Amino acid sequence: MSDKGNKQGKRKQRVDPKRQGVCFPVGEPLNNLPGDYPDFLALMVETIASRRVTALQKVNVEQLLLYWHLGQQILTKQQKAGWGAKVIDRLSQDLKKQLPSLSGFSPRNLKYMAKFAASWPDIEIVQRTVAQLPWRSNCALLDKVSEPDARVWYAKEALEQGWSRDMLVVHIDSNEFDRRGKSINNFPETLPPVQSDMATQLFKDPYLFDFIGLDAPKREAELENRLLQHLEQFLVELGQGFAFVGRQVHLELGDQDFYADLLFYHLKMRCYVVVELKTGSFKPEFVSKIHLYQAVIDDQMCHDTDQPTIGILLVKEKNNLIVEYALSGNNKPIGVANWQQTLSRQLPEDLRSSLPTIEELESELSAVLEAANHDK
């Protein structure tokens, strides 16, 4: 036998077998294989991974459609026959007995199925959007979002942005639905329609910086430092697609130096986004300064395929009428929004007027304490 034959034999069985026909196969070295083998291997791995994801998605869709149909049947019995919790508990027990190899039929889950069917009466929305989400994400939507339009919005965003259940909860708790698309801007006048719509829906008002702590920063530099100390949470609050480029970006014009607070690039919109931070109220001159930064970035940094740079002014307070006039006639896309450290939800005027003031609460508390001391 030749040396080559001996080497191949050793490659196929490294240990001498004790019985005929038993061997330990070892793969051929890459240098003995066709040149395009590595590319073929990569293609096989990619195909397996993508098909596996598709298969898992189909399993999830079918499971949620099953849950919806079971929920519809339970809901019908509850509405027409008055079935209560006791029947659901017994149903759960009997389903587990008759289908021991399956899970998901706890009393709690059966009640979620009924709520799932009641909250999503349109099977087309279920098939197109909701069934694409994990069951835990759907349970979070059912627990935390009562308004139908908001629930649909969160479901679509979770699907499009790939939010996990925990990330979905973060956006719900921060009231993202009511804040998105609320910035005052001139996007319709300065951007093409598709870009304008995307930018309008991307930016929000107010921005919630609860992660920087409760003590209010006194200076812009302090606010900037705190945001960058929590850059990951800051990027989550900004939204999907933002890539951090730099801070205090140096722009030298003639014999003067300028520094843009924060610079980002938005991957989907294909444009730079320059952010200016203010710890005080909006002033019209802020617009001129950010306009300058945008002009320089467009001229010196942008590639030919980039869209116009967007400017975002984040202020502590603003008068919307003043902002609108300050932006009118400006040819650069600029948005203005508030930032705040705690989420303040607006109460209806009639309810707000019926609530006691701080002074009234303090007076009432003093009276209670005085009465308690007198009883002693």
Image (cartoon, rainbow, N blue to C red):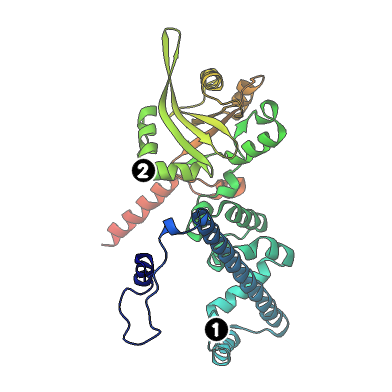
How many residues crowd around disc 1 within 10 Å: few (fewer than 14), some, or many (20 or more)? Answer: few
From the viewer's perspective, tell me whether residue 180 is left or right of residue 256.
right
In which quadrant will I find the C terminus? bottom left
The answer to whether 15 is drawn above or below residue 28 in the figure is: below
Numbered badge on residue 213: 2
* Residue 251 in sight in this render: yes
Task: Compare residues 95 and 204 and report the one nearer the observer.
Answer: 95
Between 301 and 177, which is closer to the camera in this rendering?
301
**Could you tell me which residue is drawn at 35 percent across and 50 percent down?**
366
Earlier in the chain: of badge 1 and badge 2, it is 1
Please identify the residue farthest to the front as the structure is shown. Answer: 1
Residue 355 on image: x %, y %: 52, 49
Residue lying furthest left: 376
Q: Residue furthest top?
A: 255
- Tell me if mark 2 has few (under 14), some (14-19) or many (20+) residues whose alpha carbon lies within 10 angstroms of its own: few
The quarter in which the N terminus is drawn is bottom left
Q: Residue at x 55, y 25 (%)?
A: 302
Asked if residue 318 is positioned above or below residue 98 in the image, the reply reads above
Residue type for callout 1:
Leu
Q: Secondary structure at mark 1?
A: loop
Front-most of residues 94 and 25: 25
Classify residue 164 as left or right of residue 22. right
Q: Position of residue 268 (x, y in %)?
A: 59, 40
Eyeballing the image, is 63 above or below 335? below
Amino acid type of the residue that numbered disc 2 sits on in the rendered structure: Gly
